[in-house]
Amino acid sequence: MHGERNSAGQRIYCQRHKGPLAAQEGHGGEDKQDGSMHRSHGVPPYALAKHFLVALPYAQRQCNEAQHGQEGEPPRPRQPLGGRELGRDDQSDACNNACDKPPPWVCVVVVVAHAFLVGLIFFFSLAERKKGAMSASVWIPDSAVRRCNQCSVEFSFFNRRHHCRLCGRIFCAACTDERVRVPSMFGSPDVRSPPEGMVYGAFRWAMRRGEARNANNDKRCCEACADNMRSHSAARRITEPLLVMGDGGWADIRDWRVLCCLNRGWKCAVGTLLRAWAETLQLRPYSGVTKMQRRMLTINASRVHGHVSWSVLAKACGVAVPAAAKVHPQEWWVPCRTLGCPPECAHTPGIIVDAMLFLAGDGTATQRMLRSDTLKPLLCMTNALSSYCATHDEAFQSFVLPLVVSPARYAFHVAHVLFFGVYARNPLLAGDVLLRVPHEITAEWKRTLLFTLRMQSLVTGSEIFADKSEWENALLPHDPGVRVQDILFDAISVKGSSTKPVIVPCTCVNQSTRRSYVQCFLVKKESVFADAMVQECMRFLGEISMDAMPEHVTYGVQPIDANSGLITMHAGCRSLYSLWSDRVSIQNYVMEHNQYDAIRTLRQRFCQSCAVTAVVALLVGAGDRHLDNLLLTRHGCLLGVDFSYIFGEEPNVGKRLLGNQIRITRSMIEMMGGMQSYHYNEFRRTCTELYTRCRKWHALFYFVMRALVLDGYIAEDKLQQKIETTWLPGSDSDSDARITIEDRIDRESRGESAFFDSVTDMFHHLFRSS
C-alpha cells in the first residue's frame, strides 16, 4: 500500500517499482553494506518516462525542503480532471495501473531511444563512430602559453607542449598521459589548428593517413577531459532519454538542475549534460556547432531569452527563440545561475541585449529597442551600430528615423551620433535619411556637417568651405550635448608626427551647465576607425560591468570619412617621452599636481588606469607602442592613444620584430611602489580580473570589434585569429587567463624587453625628427 515501509525502513510509494527513482536510492545515493551502489537502471524501459514525470515534482520538492530543513512528503500523481482527490489506496492503484497502460507517444520515443542507448547503437552516429575520435574545435597556439595549464610547469626544449584532443589546451607530457576513446556525441565539425608550414604540414598529412587505418585508436587528452568522457560513457543511458524528452518539450535545463537531487547516479549523469552546456557558452559566433550543441540550444531556446550571452549565441547559431518567450518573458525566465551566465548578466540592461541581437541580424530587436524608456546605454556602442547600419540600408532606415521622433530619453542623442557615424561610412544613405527628418533637425545636422567639413579642410588644404555664419553654434557630431561657437584659428598648430595631424582649439558651450570653455580637437588625415573601436570597447566594458569599473580615461572619436577623423583631446596630458626627456619621473609629476591628495589614492588611481591600458592593448593587439603614445593626466591616470595599428600590425618590419604591445617602464613601477609592494599586487590582480571578465564576454566584444570588418579596415580572418590566440575563449577555466596575463605583466615589469623598447623608441624619434 502507499505509505508502507519495507524491511530497510524506506518508504515505498509504488509497489511495483517502489515509486520514484529517488526512493530506490535513498535520495542520497548512500552505499550498501556490501560496498555496491544502488542503481535505478533496473527500471523497465517503458516506465522510464513515467518515472521521470512522477519523480520530477518530488525531487524539486525535496530540493526546496532540504534548504528549509523540512521533511519531504511522498510524491502525488497527477489528479484526474474533473474528479475527486485520490486517497492513498487509490494513488497506489493508479500508480500501478499507469505502468500497465500503453505509454503515450513520447514514452514510445523514449523506449526506442533507451533501447538504442543500451545497445550503444545510434543511427545518427554510426558514421561518426567509424572515425573513432573527436578533435577540439580550437587548438590554442603554442606561442600563446608558456606554462602547463594544470601543473604550471614552464615549457622548455626538453619539456614539450602537448595539446589535449578534446579541449585544445596545452599541457605537459605528464598531464596528458591519459588515452581514452572519445565518443562522438560532443564532436565538433570545425577544426582549427595552429598554422603550419608546408614541410611540417605534409608530414602531419602522412601521419594522419596512417592513423586513419586504425579507426578506434585512443586519443591523448588531459585528466579532466578523460574523467568527463568516462562519466559520459557511463551516463549515456540516462542523458539520451532526457534529450529525447527535451526535443518534445518535456524537459529543459531547469529540470536538469532538479534531477541532480535524485541520487548520485542521476547527479553524475545530468552533470555530463551540464558540463556540455557550460562548454557551449564558450562557442564563438563565427564557429560551427555540433549536433549536440545545437540540440541543447534548441531545447533551451525558450529559457535563454533575456540573457545576453546565450541570446547572441543562439542567434549566431541559427536557433530561433519561440515567440511565446519574447511576448511573455516573465513566464519563461530562469535565473542566471541556472543557465551558467556570467555574474554581470543579471545587471546588463535589456536594451544592450536587444542591441546585440540587432548586430547579430535579429530584425525584431529594433521594435523592442524603440519601445524602451531610455536609450542611454546605447551610447556605449554607437560605433558598432553605425557600421552595421551603414552596410544594411533597411536596418538604418527602420531604426534611425523612428528614433528622431521617439519620446524616449536620449533618443535624439543616439540618432544624432548614428547619423554622423553612418555619414562617414555611407554618405548617400545618410543623405537620403536627411531629407526625411523634421525641418528643425535637418537644420541642426546640416550645421554640424558644415562644421566637420570646415575642420577637414584644415588638414586637406581645401579652399572650399562654408562661412562661419553657416556652422556657428553647431553640435559636436559625437556629443550633441556640446555646441561649438568659434574656431581659434590663431592658435592652430601642427603636431610633430608622421601624418602631421592638426591641433584645433575651439570655444565650446556645454548645453546642460551653460559653461563656456576651450576644447582642443586633433584632426587627422588618416582613418580613425580603429581608435573609435578601442574607445568603444572600454566604454562597453564599463557598461556591462557589475562592479565599479577601474578608474580610466576615454576620449571621443568621430570619423569624418574613411581617410580622416576628429578626436577630442584630453586637457592637461603629457606623454611619457616628454617626461623622460625632461628627466621628470612619473611619481614626481603626479605628486606635484596633487599635493593635497593621499599617496595611497594617487597610486591606486595610477595602478587602475595602468591595468585598463595594458589589458585593452593586449586584447586588441595594439602596435606602434612608443612613449609618445602613452599619456599621463595631471590627476595621475595613464591612457593609450593612436591605435592606427592593431591586431599585431606594425608600421615597419623593425617594430614588427622588436615591438611590444604592453609597455611597463621602470618609472611606472616606481610609481606603484616597486614589484614587492601592495599596489603592484593590486595592479596584477586588476589586470587578471579585467582579462577574465573580457574573456567571458568574448561573443559580445566580437560584434563590437567586427565594426572594423564592416568598415573594410581589417579582414574577418584576422579578427578571428586575434580572438583565438589572445582572448582564449575555448578554455573551460580561468587558469589560462591568469597564467597568460600574469606572466606577461611580470616579464614586462622585470624589464625583459626594456632593451628592445628603448631601441624602438630611439628609431621612432630619429625618424620623426628627420
Image: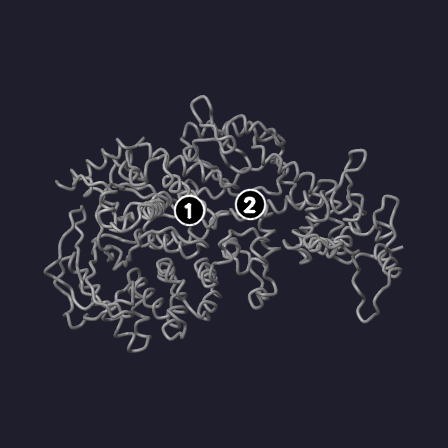
Along the line of sight, the residue nearer the viewer: 503 or 133: 503
Along the line of sight, the residue nearer the viewer: 526 or 427: 526
**Which dot, 1 or 2, sits closer to the camera?**
1
Label 1 – label 2 distance at C-alpha: 21 Å
Residue 179 at x, y = what percent?
60, 29
Looking at the rendered structure, the number of numbered marks drawn on it comes to 2
Query: What is the crowding at mark 1: few (fewer than 14 residues within 10 Å), some, or many (at least 20)?
Result: many
The kind of residue tagged 1 is Leu
In the image: residue 62, left or right of residue 430: right
The kind of residue tagged 2 is Glu
Q: Residue at x 21, y 55 (%)?
A: 522
Along the line of sight, the residue nearer the viewer: 525 or 111: 525
Q: Which residue is mark 1?
A: 690
Q: Which residue is mark 2?
A: 279
List the single residue furthest toward the bottom.
Answer: 439
Q: Quadrant of the N terminus?
A: bottom right
Q: Secondary structure at mark 2?
A: helix
Quarter holding residue 684? top left
List the single residue furthest toward the top.
Answer: 158
- In the rendered image, the vertical position of residue 306 relative to residue 669, given as above or below: below
